[in-house]
C-alpha cells in the first residue's frame, strides 16, 4: 500500500485523511526499525479530513527529521507532528529533538530552498518545498529553524480549500516510466532490507526520498562486497 500510494500520480492532490494514513504507515515501519529510539506524538485536527492537500506533503519532512536528526543523536529521539485548521488555513508543525544542524548548514539549506541549488543531503526537503511553491504560490508560508544538538522545527501554512484550480506541479517524466518505477521499487526494497540487516553501516543508509528524488536514478548500486562479507 505504501509503494502504491507513493508511486501513483505524484501531481495529484489527496484528502488530508489519506495523507495522514499513509504517513502513519510509514512511521510504523520506522518505529519498528528504531524501537524505543523513536517516539512519535500526533496532534491532528479531524476537521482537516475533508480538505485536499498536496500528495506526499508530510513524509519527506518526517523522513528528514528521522534520518538526519534523531538517528544521528545519542539516546532516544522525539518527533512531534501537529496539524490544525485556523482562519481558513492549514497549519503544519514538524518538530524533532534530534541532532539539528549548525548555523552555516541552516543558511546553506535556506539558500538552496530559495535559489534552486541542489543540496543532496536534504534533497527530499528541497524538492517537496519546490512542489509546494508550484502548487500554492504566494499562499504558501514555510519556515525552518534548527539548533545544533537541540533539534529542528518546520512550519508550513497552506490554504484550506479543495484545490479545484490547482497549478501544474508535474515532476520529471521518469516518474511515469514503467521501467524506472520497477527499478525504484527494487532499489527501495533492497535499501530498506539492507538498513534492517546492517543498521550501523552508513553505505546502506540511503533514504527513500534520496532514491525517489535522485537526479540520476541509475547511479546507485549495491556495493559488491556486501554479498561477500558483512561490513
Image (tube, helix red, strand yellow):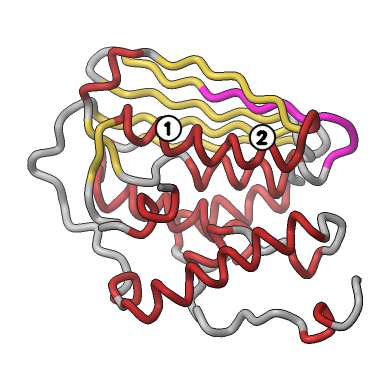
Q: Are marks 1 and 2 in contact (CB under 8 Å)?
A: no
Secondary structure of the residue carrying numbered label 2: strand
x%, y% of residue 12? 22, 50
Tell me residue 83's x, y (percent).
42, 21
Q: Quadrant of residue 49?
A: top left
Image-based side of 52 in relation to 7, left or right: left
Instruction: Please give the residue where the numbered disc 2 appears in the rendered image.
Output: 152
Residues drawn in magenta = 73-81
Residue 32 falls within the magenta-colored stretch: no
Q: Quadrant of the C terminus?
A: bottom right
Quadrant for residue 66, please give it: top right
- Give the structural element (helix, strand or loop) at label 1: strand
Circle 2 residues within 10 Å: few <14, some 14–19, many ≥20:
many
Residue, x 32% and y 49% (percent of image)? 133
Q: Position of residue 108 (x, y in %)?
A: 63, 56
- Depicted 60 relative to depicted 84: above or below: below
Residue 49 is marked as: none
Q: Residue 79 in magenta?
A: yes
Q: Is 119 in front, or is 111?
A: 119
Q: Residue at x 43, y 55 (%)?
A: 3
Q: Residue 16 sits in which quadrant?
A: top left
The residue indicated by pointer 1 is 156
x and y percentages locating residue 29 in the rendered image: 61, 41
| Number of numbered discs | 2
Distance of label 1 from label 2 (alpha carbons): 14 Å
Question: Extreme left residue here?
Answer: 165
Q: Residue at x 51, y 47 (%)?
A: 60
Q: Residues within 10 Å of mark 1 (few under 14, many from 20)?
A: some
Say which of 34 and 217 sits in front: 34
Amino acid at each position: 500500500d505504501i509503494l502504491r500510494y507513493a508511486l501513483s500520480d505524484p501531481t495529484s492532490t489527496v484528502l488530508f485523511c489519506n495523507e495522514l494514513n499513509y504517513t502513519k504507515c510509514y512511521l510504523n515501519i520506522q518505529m519498528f526499525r528504531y524501537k524505543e529510539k523513536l517516539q512519535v506524538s500526533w496532534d491532528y485536527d479531524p476537521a482537516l479530513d475533508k480538505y485536499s492537500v498536496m500528495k506526499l506533503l508530510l513524509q519527506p519532512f518526517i523522513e528528514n527529521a528521522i534520518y538526519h536528526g534523531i538517528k544521528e543523536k545519542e539516546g532516544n529521539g522525539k518527533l512531534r507532528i501537529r496539524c490544525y485548521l485556523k482562519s481558513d488555513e492549514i497549519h503544519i508543525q514538524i518538530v524533532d529533538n534530534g541532532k539539528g544542524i549548525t548555523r552555516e548548514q541552516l543558511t546553506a539549506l535556506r539558500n538552496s530552498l530559495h535559489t534552486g541549488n541542489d543540496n543532496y543531503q536534504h534533497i527530499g526537503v528541497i524538492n517537496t518545498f519546490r512542489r509546494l511553491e508550484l502548487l500554492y504560490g504566494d499562499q504558501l508560508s514555510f519556515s525552518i529553524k534548527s539548533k545544533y544538538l537541540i533539534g529542528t522545527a518546520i512550519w508550513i501554512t497552506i490554504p484550506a480549500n479543495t484545490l479545484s484550480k490547482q497549478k501544474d506541479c508535474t515532476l520529471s517524466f521518469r516518474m511515469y516510466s514503467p521501467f524506472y518505477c520497477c527499478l525504484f521499487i527494487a532499489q527501495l526494497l533492497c535499501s530498506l532490507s539492507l538498513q534492517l540487516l546492517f543498521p550501523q553501516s552508513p553505505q546502506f543508509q540511503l533514504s527513500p526520498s534520496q532514491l525517489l528524488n535522485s537526479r540520476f536514478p541509475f547511479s546507485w548500486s549495491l556495493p559488491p562486497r556486501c554479498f561477500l562479507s558483512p561490513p
